[in-house]
Amino acid sequence: DAGVIQSPRHEVTEMGQEVTLRCKPISGHDYLFWYRQTMMRGLELLIYFNNNVPIDDSGMPEDRFSAKMPNASFSNLKIQPSEPRDSAVYFCASSNVGPIYFGEGSWLTVV
Amino acid sequence: QKEVEQNSGPLSVPEGAIASLNCTYSDRGSQSFFWYRQYSGKSPELIMFIYSNGDKEDGRFTAQLNKASQYVSLLIRDSQPSDSATYLCAVELTGNQFYFGTGTSLTVIP
């Protein structure tokens, strides 16, 4: 079975531009998570969905960040406008009951 | 207060030794506990999970859980250089929320 699929794998963008990160969860998984990882703060939970509904978005750093899950097989995370401090690895993960499984990550650099 | 705390290390052990990684958590309502391994530049991958007090063994890995003391540990027997990575402890709170520690960096010296 395919794992969690994320795109793009790498993105370099200029400050002020909109960034869109995409995720396809593992088929049949009801939960989808967005995490951000930096050296300083480790893995931070940004938002998670259950059956396409956002359950907890308290980890979203500010209004510049938004996430949607229009159907069971797709989610996106948008940053508008992007800032250099948003540079990080963004992981999408999915699960049913039990462990969560990560995608390969989207490496974002904002210059 | 952080939900999950780990010693960041680095932890160095000689090849063939036992590596011991520890994690404490703050929420007594925590349901499930997981260990992930993350190689540099890669995503976290699941090694083990444990739900009940006691030990759980899987090959060279043993997870230990003590809910009364709110700690979970991972032992790696016969450590190999390929075990060199960052090990992340994760705790599942009620509502299927997963929180991760900042990880312990392990180096196995040949």
Image (cartoon, coloured by chain):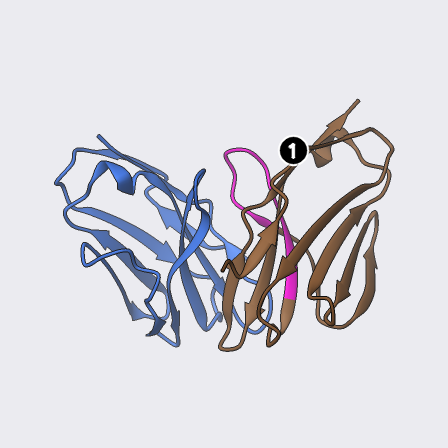
Chain colours: A blue, B brown
| Residue B37 rendering spot, x and y as whole percentages | 63, 45
In the figure, residue A31 lies in which quadrant? bottom left
- Residue A63 vertical position relative to residue A14 in the rendered view, above or below: below
Q: Does the magenta stretch include residue B36?
A: yes
In the figure, residue B38 lies in which quadrant? top right
- Residue A23 vertical position relative to residue B81 in the rendered view, above or below: below
| Residue B59 rendering spot, x and y as whole percentages | 84, 51
Q: Which of B73 and A99 is in front in this view?
A: B73
Query: How many numbered circles does the render carry?
Result: 1
Q: What residue type is labelled 1?
A: Pro
Q: Is residue A30 left or right of residue B24?
A: left
The quarter of the rendered structure image containing the C terminus of chain B is top right
Q: In this view, does B60 lie to the left or right of B31?
A: right
Q: Which residue in the protein does label 1 denote?
A: B10
Callout 1: 10 Å neighbours few (<14), some, many (20+)? few
Q: Residue at x 49, y 60 (%)?
A: B1
Q: Does the magenta stretch include residue B70?
A: no
Q: Residue at x 35, y 61 (%)?
A: A59
| Residue A30 rendering spot, x and y as whole percentages | 46, 73
Q: Which residue is drawn at 83% across and 58% down?
A: B57
Q: What element carries label 1?
A: loop
Q: Which of B69 and A100 is in front in this view?
A: B69
Label 1 marks which chain's residue?
A: B
| Residue B13 rendering spot, x and y as whole percentages | 78, 31
In the figure, residue B48 lies in which quadrant? bottom right
Residue that protrudes farthest toward the front in the picture: B1
Note whether residue A80 is visible: yes
Residue segment shown in magenta: B33-45
Q: Which of B57 and A101 is in front in this view?
A: B57
- Residue B42 vertical position relative to residue B31 in the rendered view, above or below: above
Note whether residue A2 is visible: no
Residue that protrudes farthest toward the top in the picture: B110
